[in-house]
Amino acid sequence: MSQTIRRIAFVGLGAMGQPMAVNLVKQQYHVTGFDVRPAARQWLVDRGGHAAETARDAARDADALILMVVNAAQAEDVLFKDAALEGIRIGATIVLMATCAPDKVSDIARRVEGTGRHFIDAPVSGGVVGATAGTLTIMAAAPDATFQAAEPMLRTLGANLFHLGQKPGQGAAMKIVNQLLCGLHIVAAAEGLALAERSGIDPKRALEILSGSAAASWMLKDRGPRMVEDTGKVTSAVDIFVKDMGLVMEAGKAAHMGLPLAALAEQTFRAASGMGLGLDDDSQAIAVYRALARKA
Amino acid sequence: MSQTIRRIAFVGLGAMGQPMAVNLVKQQYHVTGFDVRPAARQWLVDRGGHAAETARDAARDADALILMVVNAAQAEDVLFKDAALEGIRIGATIVLMATCAPDKVSDIARRVEGTGRHFIDAPVSGGVVGATAGTLTIMAAAPDATFQAAEPMLRTLGANLFHLGQKPGQGAAMKIVNQLLCGLHIVAAAEGLALAERSGIDPKRALEILSGSAAASWMLKDRGPRMVEDTGKVTSAVDIFVKDMGLVMEAGKAAHMGLPLAALAEQTFRAASGMGLGLDDDSQAIAVYRALARKA
């Protein structure tokens, strides 16, 4: 049976991982972080956490290993190649919070559980704002006992915690539906605001009106301000959505289902990346519309 | 100069017009309604309003004529064919609240102003819910003096009142951007929820999660419940969006701008209408996705 989780190994201290790890530190968890960038490790140490030189070292003596990496391939590297899985005790819990394809997650879960460790599929939504405030939406799938043992830890990371089912992969499937709407709403906001600009409407005024009307979306309110005035701030990069919309399209393929709007949104992010904006804030997808509406 | 508005002729007592007219009655305006359906006229009388047998009769002695009709063609019929414009006094104000093409609105405004009456372009967003609560977003364009004289009346109809500019047509242009996002968000919600269904996720659970995450939109929260469980309730029909997305595409054409997402959303509403769902609630656009994902 799972035990109370007090010691946590946290791998992946990026824009999301950093505030998440710190929220755990604040709740008196013993958090040992690992990231390939030494500066990110030091950042956590400066805030009351601990750091290790390798993922495997971070996992030693931990009750749980949280993977807040970019994708399934990185998660596999950390667990199997860097041997963090071998480094963590039997009975410990691996929590995969990256956005991955559902079949990949099932596959990793099987391999982890085969070694006597527990596994939770737990992707998140809410961005850096939610990660910082501890208000992330967490879409978890794991056997009841595994989920319950990790519940206080997960609730520290995300107030909107859902236990979707017993089978790892179900959380990933839900996250993909979530990303379909997130990505689509970003491109929809870009299309709408670009039409406003092109129609001679002050885009800031348009954004104010749309944000308070039936046209509003979470993404419009969050990304819209950076579409009408680029601050250079990057909360999530264009290339993250190139990857995530790719996963959405794979899910559609697996479900034998056409996703025409998602396909267009994917192409728009891909075009933005092709314009050299891959590392820019995803709000800059609006550049695709501006390029297409530019006088030749 | 415009005078204080106390007596209002209200033409178009549909799902939106009825609660709007009643909100004016409640604020002690003298409201005379007209609708082609006698039952709708009686409905207003039962709630403290008045009724007339023709639009022209309703307009007699009124300070303002509100047109809450379906489109520009109906507005033109009421004003010019049914001669409501001739029936209302010189110096009165015509308020066009239907969703119309911007160039049509400019054209109607010119004809109205040419007869010595004032004109306000004032489309709304917020649906029946907003109409009932008096929280509609109103996107108004009119000369300052005309707008100011009508402001208390407009504010009774919609708490989110914006004066976008002096030229009628500017409100209509803003409304079209608004409809682009509204229509798109309905179809986006349909695509996302259909993928959830197809992936074996309980759609009600999916909707709950999406409504509280970064994937949320006003339309997802409002239409989503009727997508996952059709109540037969119609707040706004599919064919309204066939019309509105048509106006969006015309605006894109006029702006020499491609609107790929809006084009797909338009085709989806058109397909839903083609499936015989034109008079059903616009949430039933999800039927298009279900039909495409049905096992043959």
Image (cartoon, coloured by chain):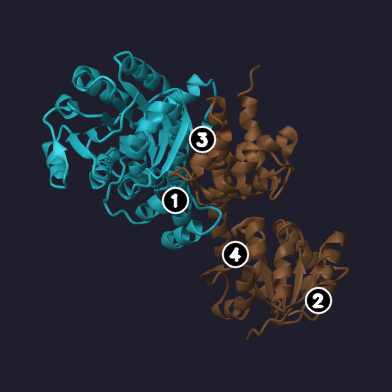
Chain colours: A cyan, B brown
Measure the alpha-carbon separation of dots 2 and 3: 48 Å
Q: Are marks 4 and 2 on the same chain?
A: yes
Circle 1 residues within 10 Å: few <14, some 14–19, many ≥20? many
**Residue that numbered label 3 is attached to:** A261
Q: Report whether A205 appears left or right of A74.
A: right
Name the amino acid type tagged 1: Leu
Measure the alpha-carbon separation of dots 1 and 2: 44 Å
Q: Position of residue A176 (x, y in %)?
A: 44, 31
Asked if B130 appears above or below B28 in the picture, the reply is: above
Task: Tell me which numbered mark, 4 or 2, is placed earlier along the sequence.
Answer: 2
Measure the alpha-carbon separation of dots 1 and 3: 17 Å
Mark 4 against mark 2, which lies toward the viewer?
A: 4
Q: Residue furthest top?
A: A114
**Residue that numbered label 2 is attached to:** B87
Task: Tell me which numbered mark, 1 or 3, is placed earlier along the sequence.
Answer: 1
Frontmost residue, B69 versus B211: B211
Q: Chain of mark 1?
A: A
Q: Report whether A71 appears left or right of B100.
A: left
Circle 4 residues within 10 Å: few <14, some 14–19, many ≥20? many
Q: Chain of mark 2?
A: B
Name the amino acid type tagged 2: Gly
Say which element carries label 2: helix
Q: Chain of mark 3?
A: A
**Residue that numbered label 4 is attached to:** B135
Q: Position of residue B215 (x, y in %)?
A: 46, 42
Q: Position of residue A163 (x, y in %)?
A: 45, 33
Name the residue: 43% across, 33% down.
A175
Name the amino acid type tagged 3: Leu
